Amino acid sequence: MDYMGTLQRAWRLTWANKWLWLLGFLAALGGGVSSTSNYNFDSGSTTTSQITPEMGMALAGGALVLMCVFFIIGILLWLVTLAAKGGLITSVAELDRGQTTSFGRAFRQGWRKVLPLVGMTLVLNAVVIILLIILFVGFAGTAMAAIAAGQGMDSNALAGILGTAGVVFLCLLCLLIPLAIVINLIYPFAYRGMMLRDLGVMDSIRHGWRVLRENLGHIFLLGLLFFVIGLVVGLVSGAIVGLLGLSTGLISMILNGSQPTTTQMVAAGLGFLVTAIIFAIISAIITAWRSATFTLAYEQWTGKDVLKDTAAPMPPAMPPTMS
């Protein structure tokens, strides 16, 4: 396989069609949604003694509504991410064939497949999730049973039982790690099988496993290249954020325990905002480039027009015999 040629061709496609970067940004949203459960409240303004039962009920109701809103927003962002990934795959395949496409067409193609993509994602990840639930429930049940049965037991014996259960739990958890890695490797090719070959949920998963099994070495090398690229970008972004903190004097003030001025805080906030925007753009470009590279490589491994997963052709019918 021509690795550098594939990388260069994918870069030329994404550079000539920069609207692919927007799809890359939307595709990266799923990995950038952070937890919204960390809130800081001023404990000096309202103490627990000042909170009435009515206020407590109102705060609990508001928190529940807020959690529901964030949950709905998270689901919508996840669906947009799935559609954007699918549109990115189909648009790169069409552009590589010389066809004309656009952002709207690509996103619509992904959105039409969003329900099968949801099903395929859930089926693949359900295996690990169910096994994790079984492990945690089993460990918790074993621990509770040991504690309940060991009321009059020696503390060392009880610690030994719990320690053994913990070791078994960690060993089984370590067995799940290779399974999770394999599933994460199957997923992008099952995705492409569904988007480019119109396969169903289970057929796309089997197709993804077949592509992974037959091209593991190529996939590993391409993944390693983009891992190094992501690592370099991460180190550069960390260095820039650190330099920004030094330039504004925030780090030295925090270490010295002094209070920064309003001007310094505003300047630091604007600097961090600009830095976040720049690296969001860089992340979108890399996401689009990586997806395009793996799509082009996938077409080399499986053929652009020939479906390797179709059944073998039937033998030709025998000519009729003369009676």
Image: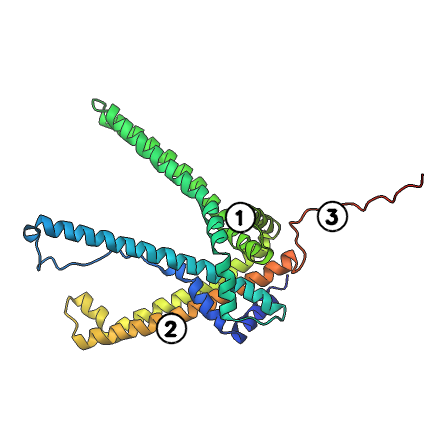
Residue 83 showing in the rendered view: yes
- Determine the CA span between mark 3 and mark 2: 52 Å
Q: Quadrant of residue 16?
A: bottom right
Q: Quadrant of residue 69?
A: bottom left
Residue 303 location (% of width, % of height): 66, 58
User: Foreground mark, 3 or 2?
Assistant: 3
Q: Secondary structure at mark 2?
A: helix
Q: Which residue is mark 2?
A: 278
Q: Secondary structure at mark 1?
A: helix
User: Foreground mark, 2 or 1?
Assistant: 1
- Determine the CA span between mark 1 and mark 3: 23 Å
Q: Residues within 10 Å of mark 1 (few under 14, many from 20)?
A: many
Residue drawn 23% across and 23% down? 153
Q: Quadrant of residue 30?
A: bottom left
Q: Secondary structure at mark 3?
A: loop
Q: Which residue is mark 1?
A: 201
Residue drawn 49% across and 74% down? 18
Residue 102 location (% of width, % of height): 52, 71
Residue 227 showing in the rendered view: no
In the image, 232: left or right of 34?
A: right
Image mark for residue 38:
none
Q: Which residue is mark 3?
A: 313
Q: Residues within 10 Å of mark 3 (few under 14, many from 20)?
A: few
Give the residue furthest to the right: 323
Q: Mark 1 or mark 2, which is nearer the start of the sequence?
A: 1
